[in-house]
Image (cartoon, grey):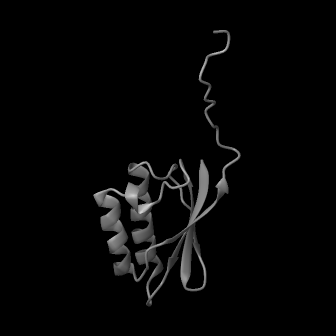
Amino acid sequence: MYITELVFECFDNTTISAVEKAVNGLMDVLRYNGQVYGREFPLLMGEGEFRVRAVCPERDSLHEKNHSPQVKACLKQLADASLLRPKIKVLGRDINSEDTYEQETPPGR
């Protein structure tokens, strides 16, 4: 699992409710598409930008090659809330996540 930060920059005046609706809608479809885990995504407001942190199953989970048509549609709708497409930064591996141990031969065989 990887902790990833999405940064949404504003390109015009907007409202918190418009940002909340657009970002939460995107995060929902990313979750349904298996690109992020969890149901709660803290949304941090900064100077002209909003940040969300999410847990992803793979380092490249949020790459556009993995986007469904629904994710692509939500990305386009960000402009309605005066937001640019998110900049994505992989912060690192989540050390609290359980990894599966892969062994070619089971022990004792």
Q: Camera-side residue: 35 or 28? A: 35
> In the picture shown, does residue 105 fall above or below 93?
above
Q: Camera-side residue: 58 or 32? A: 58
> In the picture shown, does residue 108 fall above or below 32?
above
Q: Camera-side residue: 109 or 9? A: 109
- The residue at the far top in this view is 109
| Residue located 69% across and 44% down the image | 96
On the image, the x and y values in percent for residue 64 come to: 40, 62
- The residue at the far right in this view is 95
> In the picture shown, does residue 109 fall above or below 26?
above
| Residue located 44% across and 90% down the image | 13
On the image, the x and y values in percent for residue 102 come to: 61, 29
Q: Does residue 103 appear left or right of residue 9 in this picture?
A: right
| Residue located 57% across and 71% down the image | 51
Quarter of the image for residue 99 reads top right
On the image, the x and y values in percent for residue 27 come to: 44, 60
- The residue at the far bottom in this view is 12
Q: Which quadrant does the C terminus fall into?
A: top right
Give the number of callouts.
0
On the image, the x and y values in percent for residue 105 come to: 61, 18
| Residue located 39% across and 50% down the image | 32
Quarter of the image for residue 22 reads bottom left
